[in-house]
Image (tube, rainbow, N blue to C red):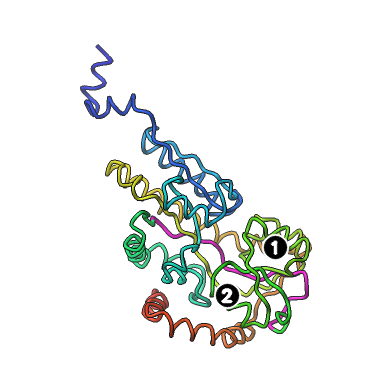
Amino acid sequence: MKFGEIFVTGLTLIAASSLFAAPVTIKVGDNWGASHPMAAALDSVFKTQVEKGSNGAIVVDVYHSGTLGNEADLWNGVRNGTIELAVVGTPMNQEYPTMMISDWPFLYRDLNHAKKVWTGPIADEMNAGFHQKFPNVHMLAWGPNSARTFTSNKKLTSVGDFKGQKFRMPSNPIHVGIAQNLGASAQVIPLGELFSALETGVVDGQDNGMVTVISESFNEVQKFLYETNHIIATLEIVVNAPFFDKLSAEHQKLIRDAAKATTEKAWNDYIASVDKDRQFLKDHGVTVTSCSAEDQQKIIELLKPLTDKLYAEQAWAKPLTDKIKAVQ
């Protein structure tokens, strides 16, 4: 009988049970618009690869733009298991300061250098250390947030223009310190509330990559963009460990491979998008000013008290930043 022949030539009883078992659902959350390279790659790569590779045994439901909560909510959701998987930045850096490496200023030669670091052995080492610190979470892969730039409603075309301005900065001592060292003031506001804060003048500006400025429509409420590229920030794919560890070895490998493929795609797409994003902003009335090598050096000097303090306080910082800078 044909039905029986399927099992004889297939995977016997294991395959039979998979045909009738209810699919496992992975709920995935991020805090970005669907056009952000990481969000887009979740749809085009992660969801597709996992569902196809599992023959429908795993269903991936992706929720963009903070639908499942802000970044802290996503992180806490993965830790406690109410969300299986999420893309986050570094909301855990107060508990685990090593994650401040994601926001270290002027660490890379360029975007391709950053990509090579976070798709290579250093990322694997960081993933292992992360799981030791947070046993309920596995970190799977590191993708691009963006090369961060500053925008403002006030003139912002040189280093001297920072003085006296109010910038929204992430809840992170590096970001807050950068604004302060540049002569500005910093206010911590969740990303989901930032458009309104810019529109109503609660803050003059903010720092994010051009891709985020566009995906969050900040160009509608900002006049100037200063392309400092002071941080090439990352986004990490994290998964609840109790959920993940219950999956078969085959499905664990499938998800790990899909996560790495997702970040590889996101890095490539992000790097390819930078020139287009810059032109889009110019075409939509934003004054975009590239940071000259001279101005960049001035910014690095202004930030030296911050980086010196970080090196003095964090024993991991010098060895890790040296290792990253040495990647060719």
Residue drawn 35% across the image and 50% down it:
241
Circle 1: is it few (<14), some (14-19), or many (20+) Cα within 10 Å? few
Label 1: element kind: helix
Most common SS among magenta residues: strand
Residue 146 falls inside the magenta stretch:
yes
Mark nearer the N terminus (1 vs 2): 2
Labelled disc at residue 279 = 1
Please tell me which residue is depicted at 77% across the width and 67% down the height of the picture: 223
55 sits to left or right of 105: left
Query: What amino acid is at disc 1?
Result: Gln
In the foreground, 302 or 280? 302
Quarter of image, res 178: bottom right
Name the residue at 55% across, 54% down. 37
Quadrant the N terminus occupies? top left
Q: Position of residue 259 (x, y in %)?
A: 41, 51
Q: Does residue 8 lie above or below 30 as drawn? A: above
Q: Position of residue 188 (x, y in %)?
A: 62, 67
Disc 2 crowd, CA 10 A, few/some/many (<14, 14-19, 20+): many
**Residue at the top extreme?**
1
Q: Quadrant of residue 49?
A: top left
The part of the chain drawn in magenta is: 140-159
Which percent across, then down, holds residue 62? 51, 43
Is residue 98 part of the magenta span, yes or no?
A: no
Q: What residue type is labelled 2?
A: His
Name the front one of labels 1 and 2: 2
128 is higher (above) or lower (below) than 78: below
Marks 1/2 in contact by CB < 8 Å: the verdict is no
- Left or right: 7, with 193 as reference point: left
CA gap, disc 1 and disc 2: 20 Å
Q: Name the residue under label 2.
A: 230
Q: Position of residue 200 (x, y in %)?
A: 78, 62
> What element does badge 2 sit on?
loop
